[in-house]
Amino acid sequence: MKKFIALLSTVFIAVSALAGEFPDISIAEVKALLGTKKATIIDVNGTESYAAGHVPGALDFDAIEKDFAKSLPEDKNALIIAYCGNPRCTAYQAAAKAAEKLGYKNVKHMSAGISGWKKAGETTEKAK
């Protein structure tokens, strides 16, 4: 039974890697990073959603996608956080994979998304 569980765990890890999964980062961790300039946060919900309310300081992926590299820090080890609507949403992968393709090695996913952020009572910022 132990061997079966170990095999199952290995398969799950391999499938997650193939599916383009990125390490999760919690709402509390993201909140602690706000204003520190230690992370670049990317909202992948679309410009209309972004305008209605996003994590403070987040960048609108739709608006920067064409010149994405210019919006990211020079340091390829810098923390990049991508999020979308909710835990079932996979749109975040567009920004996460784009950052990874540019050579960034510390890309994470706030899986709670903007819906989780709001549900946790965190404040949002509207587009200016």
Image: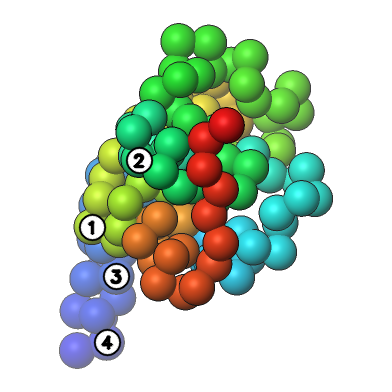
SS state under label 2 = helix
Taking the spot 47% from the left edge, 74% from the top edge, the residue there is 120
Q: Position of residue 117 (x, y in %)?
A: 46, 64
Q: Which residue is mark 3?
A: 9
Sequence-earlier tag: 3 or 1:
3
Q: Which residue is mark 1?
A: 88
Nearer the camera: disc 2 or disc 1:
2
How far apart are labels 3 and 1 at the CA level?
A: 21 Å
SS state under label 3 = helix
Amino acid on which the number 3 mark rests in the picture? Ser
Q: Which residue is mark 2?
A: 49
Sequence-earlier tag: 2 or 3:
3
Q: Position of residue 92 (x, y in %)?
A: 36, 41
SS state under label 4 = helix
In which quadrant is the N terminus drawn? Answer: bottom left
Residue nearest the viewer, comparing 48 with 59: 48
